[in-house]
Amino acid sequence: MSQLDHFLLRAEQVLNRVEALLPEVVSIPDWESGTAFRWRKRGTQAYLQVVKHVSKISFDDLQHVSQQKKLIEQNTRQFVHGKPANNVLLTGARGTGKSSLIKACLHEFASQGLRLIEVDKADMADLPDIIELIAERPEKFVLFCDDLSFEEGEPGYKALKVALDGSIAAQTENVLIYASSNRRHLMPEKMSDNAGYHHADDGDLHPGETVEEKISLSERFGLWVSFYPFKQEDYLDIVGYWLSRFACTTAQIETARAEALRWALQRGSRSGRVAWQFARDYAGRLNSP
């Protein structure tokens, strides 16, 4: 390595160290350019990136989750209209429509001022900065984290607890947090956690501090919405719905039933996602040259 190359390498290392010490700069987005955003970070620069192609899924597209749909839609309607509403935790079987319901909320209420900001789990520690950035805006913001779960010691866990209701600052009226997860309590549960349980003198069973800590985050969400695996006929109904959306005839939909069941068996799941994937494949093959 030449003397110049060595100098440039050392200079780059110094700059990287200085950059890490600099305060993070948050750029203001063009709020009129979209209804959905993603929180992004690049070096010391943090910004909201406009989602140019927003999902068009609607409440009508989500089948056999009517109760869950009713709860989410009503809570979001209250929020958009300035009424009290809750942070929401959607939990349960994979592929049953948890994240799709949140996207459908944007489709339904964007014209009434709802905006969606997707925040990756790795960026949960930035929640205070995001909330501060949007706190004075007239729009209503849902901060959306998909497939949320934490391992021991992750910094985002504490930040989310504080954002939900643990800060000295009052909760911002134009911000809610909607999170989807396959875990009800968002953190892994171990057999050793049960050792923290103890019996009181009156015979009651009391959880130890470890268990209390793991369930406390979930309890800060005001609304829990649970999703369950679909029965076979429900799955086939969803297949039929999407095939009809792909312009398949009634006869073609009926013929597809057996193949749809084999498709689900191969994937070990009768979920809405699997039904949609099968419908795309089947309709595409029908119409291929």
Image (cartoon, rainbow, N blue to C red):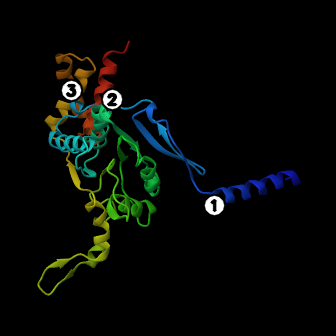
Identify the residue under disc 2. 56
Depth check, front residue: 156 or 265 = 156
Give the image quarter of residue 16.
bottom right
* Amino acid carrying mark 3 in the image: Tyr
* Amino acid carrying mark 2 in the image: Lys
- Which quadrant of the rendered structure holds the C terminus? top left
Q: Which residue is outermost to the right?
A: 3
Depth check, front residue: 63 or 79 = 79
**Residue 170 location (% of width, % of height):** 34, 59
Pointer 2 or 3: first along the chain: 2
Give the image quarter of residue 237.
top left
**Is residue 151 something that shows in the picture?**
no
**Residue 91 location (% of width, % of height):** 26, 51
Identify the residue under disc 3. 241
CA distance separating discs 2 and 3: 16 Å
Pointer 2 or 1: first along the chain: 1
Which residue is painted at 37% across and 58% down in the image? Answer: 163
Q: Which element is circle 1 on?
A: helix
Mark on residue 21? 1
CA distance separating discs 1 and 3: 54 Å
